[in-house]
Amino acid sequence: MGDAISSLLFQPPPPTRLKESKVIWLTNSFGKRIPAFFIECPKDDRTGEGIRAPLPGEQPQGGGGGGSYYSKGSTKSQMNHTLATGGSRTNGAGNAVTPPSYNNNNNGGEEGPQQVPSTPQIRTSKELEMSLLNNGRIGGGPSAPGGGGNASCTPTILYSHANAEDLGNIYPWCKFLSKMLGVNIFAYDYTGYGLATDQGDPSEEYCFADVTAAYTYLNQTLQIPAHSILLYGRSLGSGPSCYLAAKSAEEGEAVGGLILHAPFLSVYRIVLESGCTLPGDRFANVDYAPFIRSPVLFIHGTKDSIVPFNHSERLLDTIIEPYRADPLFIKDMGHNNVHASVRPLFVERLREYLDTHILPELRERRKHSESARSRMVNRVRSARLQQAR
């Protein structure tokens, strides 16, 4: 039964090609080579925070700050109204704002009604390593005292994609998220997907090894600390994301956050309510969830016909109370896409999650880092003055 489940669970699409020069190659613990890409968002030099592109109806409120482009009239009650009505929302004057028509093209849906000040860029491994060598960090903001730290207030999302997807066809979506949320995005392919189709058939074990290899690259090679890394798992990707979130907590260095988009309790439970994890089941997220120690945001469409909506509701119940973020359950949305009509709501709620649960800690850490750096500079100056005397 396990082989039959695997053949149904893993359905890699025909490989989508990416520019080889932009691919970052990783090797997992089984020796399998998998591709990845890193999208770096533009940052405010003063704050070190990612710059967010405005949503329709929003006016730029200044550079950076992680919330730079919020409309003055946008309220939570209006967001809730959007949730109930399927995407329409109002501005501060109470007038309807028409959602944008984002094009799912290789520019990441960058066409829109307002000019974006700058756009995210895909970075090669050499560019990232040179940035680390020259600046002591990836992205904007001052380096940590002594260099080698990442004092940037820009989170990096480690993105685990759904089934029947690969890096080539998720690139526009990832660039859209980077642009609208002001975050870096690091996405990878599973063994057996995309440019890794020659590495063997996909499996749960390989997926866990793949996400671990991606996390290790961010955390050890690029020296991005765990608290600056957010995991985003969509559908199948919820499996490796839950696994890594629980694993990082168990090891005493929990990731900064976890976003679960259309997750499932376990593979068997999608078709059969077993009441427990049966032998041969795959990606038992319900068993990992109680051990997660990072703020968790659930996103699910109420009309999902592939993964029942109640899987997110039940998973939410297994998360320890302090780590439950307000979920985003979108009326009439299905499984496989986020329609243009609900994208403004989607973006606003993800920004709210970042602004409430992620950015405050990064700002506090940056503040402490700058204070320590200032003390170090003062000590050096004092020592030089004493030597001069």
Image (cartoon, grey):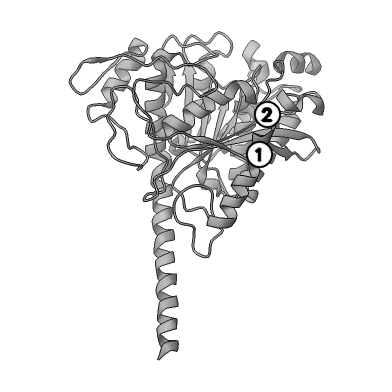
In the image: residue 98, left or right of residue 183: left
| Residue drawn at point x = 69 percent, y = 32 percent | 20
In the image: residue 221, left or right of residue 31: left
The kind of residue on which mark 2 rests is Asp
- What residue is disc 1 on? 214
Quote the CA–CA distance across marks 1 and 2. 10 Å
Which label number is shown at residue 27?
Answer: none
Placement of 373 over or under 108, stated as above or below = below
| Residue drawn at point x = 56 percent, y = 56 percent | 134
Q: Is residue 317 visible?
A: no
Placement of 26 over or under 88, stated as above or below = below
The kind of residue on which mark 1 rests is Ala
Q: Is residue 275 visible?
A: yes
Q: Quadrant of residue 112?
A: top left
For marks 1 and 2, the one nearer the N-term is: 2
Q: Nearer the viewer, residue 369 or 275?
A: 369
Q: Position of residue 104 (x, y in %)?
A: 51, 17
| Residue drawn at point x = 73 percent, y = 33 percent | 34
Q: Nearer the viewer, residue 214 or 247?
A: 214
Q: Quadrant of residue 33?
A: top right
Q: Position of residue 4 (x, y in %)?
A: 78, 13
- What residue is disc 2 on? 189
Q: Nearer the viewer, residue 14 or 279?
A: 14
Placement of 58 over or under 300, stated as above or below = below
